[in-house]
Amino acid sequence: MSNFIHYRDYIGSVEFSEEGEIFHGKVIGIKDLISFEGDSVKSLIEDFHNAVDEYLEFCEQNGKLPEKPFKGTFNVRIQPELHRKAVLAASARGISLNAFVEDAIRHNVN
């Protein structure tokens, strides 16, 4: 079972409100807010597709570039001592800090 749905290049989270008896979610990986809901799986997926299409239409009509999720860049804030240790470990391996962090993330998500 997955808590995500996909449409075009966008991924939406899926949650269920027992109290409201409704599925709801939002597009993840972008700053703009795109939310959707439905009282069935079919209506949730339909509203998700409509929300993404409306977002893309809005961007086009307003001359705005739509955000692309997961561009491959992000900021990470860590304690200075951990930052120092990471730089030293990367240097000892002869790789960049970016390559070191990418390897650490790859190791933890696979």
Image (tube, helix red, strand yellow):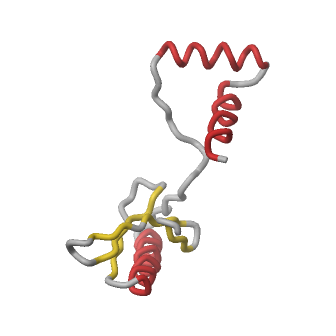
* Residue 104 in the image: above or below residue 3: above
The answer to which quarter of the image holds residue 93 is top right
* Residue 29 in the image: above or below residue 22: above
Q: Residue at x 66, y 13 (%)?
A: 88
Q: Residue furthest left?
A: 19
Q: Residue at x 58, y 67 (%)?
A: 9
Q: Residue at x 34, y 81 (%)?
A: 38
The answer to which quarter of the image holds residue 97 is top right
In the image, 91 versus 108, the foreground residue is: 108
In the image, 55 versus 65, the foreground residue is: 55
Q: Tell me where residue 12 appears, x and y as whole percent.
A: 46, 66
Total count of labels: 0
Q: Tell me where residue 57 appears, x and y as whole percent.
A: 45, 76
Relative horizontal placement of residue 29, taking residue 16 as reference (left or right): right
Relative horizontal placement of residue 105, taking residue 4 as reference (left or right): right
* Residue 31 in the image: above or below residue 65: above
Relative horizontal placement of residue 17, taking residue 64 as reference (left or right): left
Q: Residue furthest right?
A: 94
In the image, 41 versus 7, the foreground residue is: 41
Q: Tell me where residue 104 appears, x and y as whole percent.
A: 65, 33
